[in-house]
Amino acid sequence: MQQRERAPWIRPVVALAVTAVFFLPLYLVLANVFKHGADITDSPASPPWPPTLDNLSAALSRPDRLFWNGLINSVTITFLSIMVLTVLSAMLGHYLCRSRSRTARITMLVLLAGLMIPPQVILVPVTDMLQLTGMMATLQGIVAFNVGYYVPFGVFVFSGFIRTIPMELEESAAIDGAGRWRTFWQVVFPLLRPATASVLIFLGVWIWNDFLNPLIILGPAGGTTVTVGVYRAIGEHQQDYGQVFGLMFLAALPVLLFYIVLQKHFVKGLTGGAVKG
């Protein structure tokens, strides 16, 4: 009985402690974005008073256009990757979910096994293949890598959600004369909006925040992304921490706005395949 009475007090304390741990890095970034450079090194944890926009202005007006070039590349890579991934994952997930053949089950197992492979493990053979195909140091190369690596996750989310859609809807469309292509795009795909939002958010955040793969695949000749731009803003002998925090803040804004737009479908898309198996 005493343990049950203490449980309501323990949970808020643990939740508050965990929240503080996760909020601390966010506070440090937000505080130092609006702080003068000297104050960042002297007291990084102090609040920004008086606040200043010099760091954001300096990051936006760099002569090398580091942020703007990285923003264009990041938007292009992320948009193309998630669009191709959404279409391919939805179509493949629908086929594997509705098919009863042994080949479909084996393919699903192979795709799920791909979720356990870290991208760093396959980076060397991927770069070799991109060099052979002439796509190394190009935006097409990093997009192809993202599509190949993240398709298993998209298929996993879409197939779980498709199982909740009654098969009778597709059978009714077939009776009305609709083909498989038309049935998928006009009947099934509109019902996948929550799952689509979840795939877009997850893959969009992962691809946007990716650092190592753009750094290696694009290289200095292929341009930069916003995450790689933060790394390149730090020199060997000179560091402007104000600009670095400004670049970090600006790099996080687009993906944060993207999440806010789609967040109402986020939880529904994740739990959509949890009821029916």
Image (spheres, grey):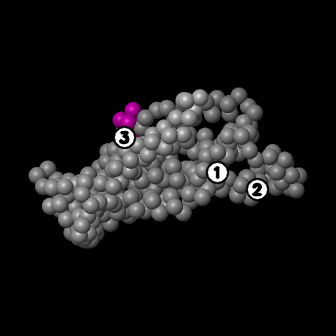
The amino acid type, in three-letter code, at marker 2 is: Val
Where, quadrant-wise, is the N terminus in this rendering?
Answer: top right
Q: Which residue is mark 2?
A: 187
Q: Is residue 125 magenta?
A: yes
> The magenta stretch spans which residues?
120-126
Residue 5 sits above or below residue 267 on the image: above
Tell me the mark number nearer the camera, choosing from 1 and 2.
1
Residue at the (83%, 54%) spot, across then down: 173
Tell me the mark number nearer the camera, choosing from 3 and 1.
1
The x and y percentages for residue 229 are 29, 56
1 or 2: tag closer to the N-terminus: 2
The x and y percentages for residue 255 are 44, 58
Can you tell which quarter of the image residue 42 is in?
Answer: bottom left
Q: Is residue 273 magenta?
A: no
Disc 3 on helix, strand or loop?
helix
Disc 2 on helix, strand or loop?
helix
Where, quadrant-wise, is the C terminus in this rendering?
Answer: top right
Disc 1 on helix, strand or loop?
helix
The x and y percentages for residue 220 are 26, 52
Res. 95 visible in picture: no
- Mark carried by residue 268: 1
- Mark carried by residue 127: 3
